[in-house]
Image (spheres, rainbow, N blue to C red):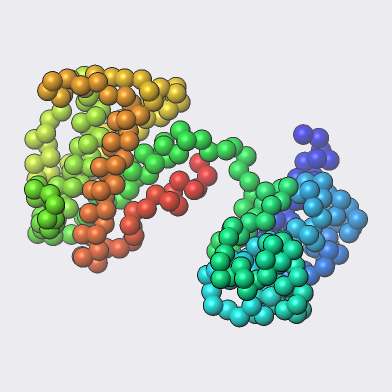
Amino acid sequence: MSTATKTQVDTFADFVDHLAEALDDPDGGPASGAEWAARLHFSRFHFDRMIRSVAGEPPASFRRRILLERAAYRMITTGAPLLDIAVEAGYGSHEAFTRAFTKAYGVAPATWRRKPGHIQIAAPSDVHFHPPGSLRLPARDKVTSMDLLTKMVEHHVWLTGEMVRLAERLTDEQLDERIELNVDEDEQTIRSLLSRLIGQMGMWNAAMATRDYDWSVEEHESLSSMRERLATEGATYLSHVRGVVEANRLDDTFVDVLCEPAEVFTYGGMIAHVLTFAAHRRTLVVLAFGRHGIEELGWGDPMLWVAQPA
């Protein structure tokens, strides 16, 4: 990348950062292109040229598009009057806002609010308003299905550790309190579910290493034992997953000699099995936690985890 190109890219990134900050500014930040150029220490001519060269649209158009996308988000998530949303988006009248919105989205704001669609407006830079109040540059590296699979396993190992940590706040009676289910013959408790979450990874680690798994460790296991086992079994299992994903071997098979008779599984099928049954057990744990006033993990949803950059 040449020095000139790097300067243009850096200036664009600075512009996006400043614009993101201005979204929460009660005064809306700089209103004119000249004010934006001055803030970033460029002449209006050079500022417009640099932003257009990177973003594919002039800074004024870029800013108007972002504010329209935020306005669309506000229409979906708030009951604010359209005039208030129009003013927040920088329009002096309802009519001007309606014209701009209709041009961008194909329908008038009132119509779109009743039947909303995609809030992002197509743009060369692929930079858009990111709810609830920021901007997001496009990812340099596209997330593949394999990246997603690895992240889901990473989330599972992390969340299991957090559950064990939070379980230390509970008494033995609370840990061993029966979780009522009328569709499962097994008696479940927070203790048994946490132990099984770790044991599930340990069991498959054993299967892939062609060795026996010691089921007795899960009999009324202590939290200190769980922490020690997770440090080993979680790291080992995650290492298996990363290795298989990086080598593109999800369809490769291995023999599980722990089954009677022995069975053949694919690595991809095994990972899907672990995540499916783990999600059920984790949900039961967080619901049981909630009964005892422990709610900081929410539902344990991986949605935000997998969306974060590596």
User: Which is more toward the observer, 65 or 216?
Assistant: 65
Q: Is residue 263 above or below residue 125?
A: above
Of residues 106 and 13, the one drawn nearer to the viewer in this rendering: 106
Residue 204 lies in what quarter of the image? top left
Tell me which residue sits at (32%, 36%) in the image.
272
Quarter occupied by residue 241:
top left
The answer to whether residue 75 is above or below residue 259 is below
Q: How far across and how far down the image is residue 60, in percent?
A: 80, 61
- For residue 253, side relative to residue 106 (left or right): left
Residue in front for this viewpoint, 45 or 144: 144
Which residue is pictured at 62% across the width and 71% down the height?
111
Residue 245 falls left or right of residue 180: right
Could you tell me residue 191's position as x and y percent?
15, 50
Q: Residue at x 18, y 59 (%)?
A: 170
State the image coordinates of residue 118 (x, y, percent, origin top left).
Answer: 59, 57
Query: Is 46 on the left or on the right of 235, as rendered?
Result: right
Vertical relation: 288 (above or below) 217: below
Q: Position of residue 262 (x, y in %)?
A: 17, 20
Residue 233 in view here: yes
Snapshot quadrant of residue 41: bottom right
Q: Is residue 129 left or right of residue 124?
A: left
Q: Quadrant of the N terminus?
A: top right
277 is higher (above) or lower (below) than 99: above
